[in-house]
Amino acid sequence: MLPFMRWRHRVTRDTLRNDFVAGLTGAIVVLPQGVAFATIAGMPPEYGLYAGMIPAIVAALFGSSWHLVSGPTTAASIVLFSSLSVFAEPGTAEYVGLALTLTVMVGVIQLVMGLARLGTLVNFISHSVVIGFTAGAALLIASNQFKHFFGIEIPRGGHFHDTILSLFSQLGDINIYVTAVGLVTLLTGIAARRFLPRLPYMIIAMVAGSLAALGLNAAFGESVTAIRTVGALPAALPPLSMPDFSLHTLRELAPAALAVTLFALTEAVSIARSLAIRAGQHIDGNQEFIGQGLSNIAGSFFSGYVASGSFNRSGLNYEAGAKTPIAAIFGGSLLMVIVLFVAPYAAYLPNAAMAGILFLVAWGLIDFHHIRNIIATSRSETAVLASTFFGTLFLELEFAIFLGVILSLVLYLNRTSRPRVISRVPDPKVPGRHFTTDPALPECPQLKIVRIDGSLFFGAVSHIRESFSLFLARQPEQKHLAIITSGINFIDVAGAELLVQEAGSRRLNGGGLYLVGAKDGVCKPLQNGGYLDEIGRDHVFASKSEAIGRIFEQLDADVCRNCTRRIFSECQALPLPATGG
């Protein structure tokens, strides 16, 4: 419950200096990002800044990562907007109240999952789901900003195709002055990012867009340009807030809370792990769940909406030289100070400039490199990616996430339920006749040797039984079956009963079932359940050489005398069969 005690010894005068610089850099960067993400979420702009204050400090204290920085993120913001805009008008007091309630619900779920040690669950959300959702969310972010970028009215709450159709139906109504401000911001941001990579390109782009708006207003008048601005932000610390805990509200928001939780935790833990690998740190996934949960619970009472790990700010924190979580604590604290002085200047920030910034954010979210790799590598993963992508565009966002997760689990279960069952034969060309998988080499006419690569559990029993039946149908004289079990890591009751049934069936037909190289994960369940006695303890061998030597004694001697294949070393002692002539 006090994880910060684990890294307190790392805090020195030198680390404090590095952490302060990294925290200050992060506090400056979160200014435009916080306003941008709040706009995506449908929240008043200042709430994006509030979400980067208290939640960042709490997550740093109670998480396990040295470099993870929590706060508002694109994914959490777009899911929040999609989930809540059907219940209330974005930006209104009712909408903000729902957002705070959703935040505390997400925090409680995260905390409970962490305390229940369910940190490994996020591993079931595949990389393809994340890539597909993020690409779809990028298009949604851009489409939701069309009205601000082009100065037209687009009804809220519509799906992606509704927004596109509405844009094309109003091409003649585009405000050229508003669009000019958006283009100046967009092009300046692209240029700054490319040619001035060390400087905060978002702030540079915002300043350029604001100056462009001031120039157009001075030249043509505000009544002509109709350029709207974000408006002055309150220069104050995050005010106390109270979520709505009515049963009706909790029931309405439950599906969205679960979807946001899944994606927020995946985002945070993935970022923490990627940075931990670079820093040589071990990440405790359960502790990250607890830290994220407490940060969202605390944030909901300090006017912050759903926070998660931010890849941009966490990466910047690492690159800026952060050594301990103190850097994130400095970042949240310094942001409070900066807001007191900078917030009033948001009155000069045009909505079109914010739209231009969000176009840049959206473009950066589309991971073209990994999309190409997934398409080139796997059809099944491509199907997951495409389903999540199109689901994000045309379904409710939380259902798109669930769709991707379900498809990933289906594919995972399909793979694990069809373990490889491959034939193995000794290779006479190799010293010691090591086993190999070569269909050109002859098999013993009485003994079938196979290796199972995968877990022998209830979902795989049917596939393995069919494989055994197919082997026997092809070569019914192979009444003996030796299973190399080194590739089996786990066996359950259904798997154990399959082995018992196969052993009994082969025994009735004059053959036998043998287990070779069994691990503890296989032997212990068989022994504890009494299955080993039914299979035959003398049919379980530690090594291949021991197994072949004992099984050879069980083979039909008459068949062996007339066999010309000489598969095993033991066969060499037999006289060659007589040939006619």
Image: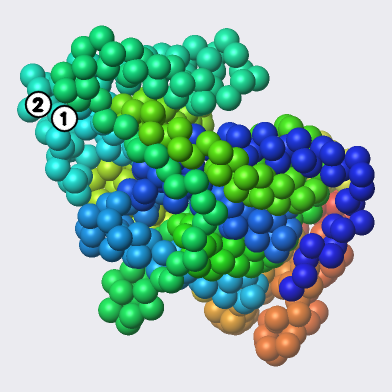
Where on the picture, by quarter, is residue 8? bottom right
Viewer-closest of 325 and 151: 151
Image quadrant where one finds the C terminus = top right
Residue 446 visible to an observer of this rendering: no
Residue occupied by mark 1: 152
Locate residue 342 relative to residue 85 in the image: left or right.
right
Q: Residues within 10 Å of mark 2 (few under 14, many from 20)?
A: few
Residue 434 visible to an observer of this rendering: yes
Spot occupied by residue 532 in the image (x, y as percentages of width and height) = 72, 83
Q: Residues within 10 Å of mark 1 (few under 14, many from 20)?
A: some
Could you tell me the amino acid type at mark 1? Ile
Locate residue 486 relative to residue 492 in the image: left or right.
right
- Residue visible at 41% across and 71% down in the picture: 243
Q: Is residue 289 above or below residue 30?
A: below
Locate residue 38 relative to residue 319 in the image: left or right.
left
**Of the numbered discs in the image, which one, if any, rests on residue 510?**
none
Q: Is residue 311 above or below residue 6?
A: above
Q: Is residue 97 above or below residue 443?
A: below
Front: mark 2 or 1: 1
Could you tell me the amino acid type at mark 2? Gln
Q: How is the image coloured?
A: rainbow
Viewer-closest of 501 and 84: 84
**What is the spatial separation of the Cα atoms under label 2 and label 1, in whole angstroms?**
7 Å
Tally of marks: 2
Q: Is residue 416 above or below residue 509?
A: above
Spot occupied by residue 478 in the image (x, y as percentages of width and height) = 61, 62
Residue occupied by mark 2: 170
Spot occupied by residue 143 in the image (x, y as percentages of width and height) = 27, 34
User: Marks 1 and 2: in contact by CB < 8 Å?
Assistant: yes
Spot occupied by residue 2 in the image (x, y as percentages of width and height) = 77, 70
